[in-house]
Image (spheres, helix red, strand yellow):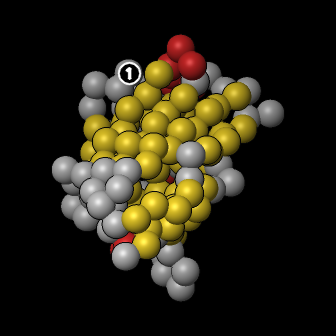
Amino acid sequence: QVQLVESGGGVVQAGGSLRLSCAGSGMNFNMYLMGWFRQAPGKEREFVAAISWSGDRTSYADSVKGRFTISRENAKNTVYLQMNSLKPEDTANYYCAGAWGITDLSSESRKYNRWGQGAQVTVSS
């Protein structure tokens, strides 16, 4: 069955970096728009970044633009989120998500039909 598994979360001090990975299986990975979302306690899930099938187009939330980078390696069925200059407000559970056959860089969670289990990122001040 289709599965997305995140890894790379953890605890880091403000100003530090982390890289999240998300490995897909049981899916035609290069036909999926891939995205990252996050959800902090007591808050709604929010869009972080998205990347096109081939990786030639990316989109970011304003809150992470210039600090986070999304990338993918289709040969490894993996999408990454490099997070630099982390802030305490970046603390959240981070989810990778896939949207089959979607060509626009959607920030709408309802368009994504495959989700990982989440990876906790905690940024201490």
- Where's residue 39, x and y in %? 51, 69
Residue in the image at 28% along x and 25% along y: 56
Check disc 1: other Cα within 10 Å, few if <14, some if 14-19, many if 20+. Answer: some
Residue in the image at 52% along x and 62% along y: 11
Quadrant of the snapshot with the N terminus: top right
Is residue 87 depicted above or below 2 in this figure? below
Relative placement, left or right, of 28 versus 57 is right
Residue nearest the viewer, comparing 37 with 121 = 121
- Where's residue 28, x and y in %? 61, 22
Residue in the image at 50% along x and 44% along y: 20
Relative placement, left or right, of 55 versus 45 is left
- Where's residue 103, x and y in %? 38, 33
Tell me if I can see residue 112 in this picture. Answer: yes
Quadrant of the snapshot with the C terminus: bottom left
Tag 1, which secondary structure? loop
Is residue 22 depicted above or below 18 in this figure? above
Tell me if I can see residue 106 in this picture. Answer: no
Quarter of the rendering containing residue 117: bottom right
The residue that label 1 is drawn on is: 54
- Where's residue 84, x and y in %? 31, 51
Q: Amino acid at mark 1?
A: Ser
Residue nearest the viewer, comparing 3 with 23 = 23
Quarter of the rendering containing residue 33: top left
Count of numbered marks: 1
